[in-house]
Amino acid sequence: MKPSSKRTLGIVLIVLSVLTLAIGFCQIVPLGFVDFPCFDDMVRQQEINSDTRIVYCISIWPRQAISGGAIYDEGTSNQDEIKVRDLNLKRDEQALLVNNHPVNPQESYETVLWRASISPWLIFTSRFEIKNEGITSIGSSDPSNVLYVSGDVHEGWLPNPLGLIILGVGIWLFRQGKKEQKQEPNKIEAC
């Protein structure tokens, strides 16, 4: 690779690294208030029929909220198995299987999902805490037939070393190109 090519590639990597750092900063800066997480009253408002098997309401606490939460997902199911975004919920009598992990009544299951962001400086996290509330007596249906699932999703972030690696490679390429350009003898062409 020519010295000027290394230098140019180094500059491009440095600029991209700084731009993605700014993008990453914008992705984690709190923007506003969110005030509509799940409440017990919301479960009572669900359409619960005599064949309803699962009722769920899961709150989310976003990484970009100054305070408060919102609803990650809510609803009912007439089946014993349902997909709720990143979660698979399956009813087995009074027990609940969350992504194939058993959760007995009044117990919780916690798991963390990791995702890359568009910025190589950040890794996004979602910490799920899903609780099996057990058989509930909400609604007009047979109370022994409805399993209530509640939960919270806490979003966060961690630093990703990839951004620092890209910046380091860019600086190294820039310095190598500059060093090789200085070492190259000046060629004088004879006329």
Image (spheres, rainbow, N blue to C red):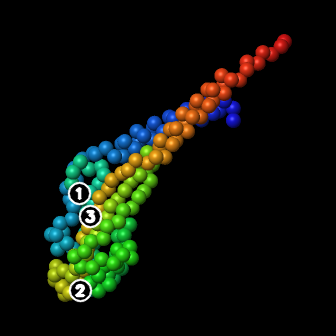
Please, what is the three-letter code of the amino acid marked with disc 2? Asn
The disc at residue 152 is: 3
Q: Give yes or no for contact between labels 2 and 3 (Cβ–Cβ under 8 Å).
A: no
In this view of the protein, which residue sits in the foreground, 156 or 40?
156
- Quarter of the image with the N terminus in it: top right
Above or below 161: residue 97: below
Quarter-of-image position of residue 21: top left
Residue 125: x and y, percent?
37, 56
Q: Would residue 33 be found to the left or right of residue 86 on screen? A: left
Residue 85 visible in this rendered orientation of the protein: no
In this view of the protein, which residue sits in the foreground, 41 or 163?
163
The disc at residue 145 is: 2
- Counting residues from the start of the chain, the first of labels 2 and 3 encountered is 2
- Counting residues from the start of the chain, the first of labels 2 and 1 encountered is 1
Please, what is the three-letter code of the amino acid marked with disc 3? Asp
Q: CA distance from mark 2 to mark 1?
A: 30 Å
Above or below 85: residue 164: above
Q: Residue at x 24, y 79 (%)?
A: 105
Q: Would residue 42 be found to the left or right of residue 7 on screen? A: left
Under tag 1, what secondary structure?
Answer: loop
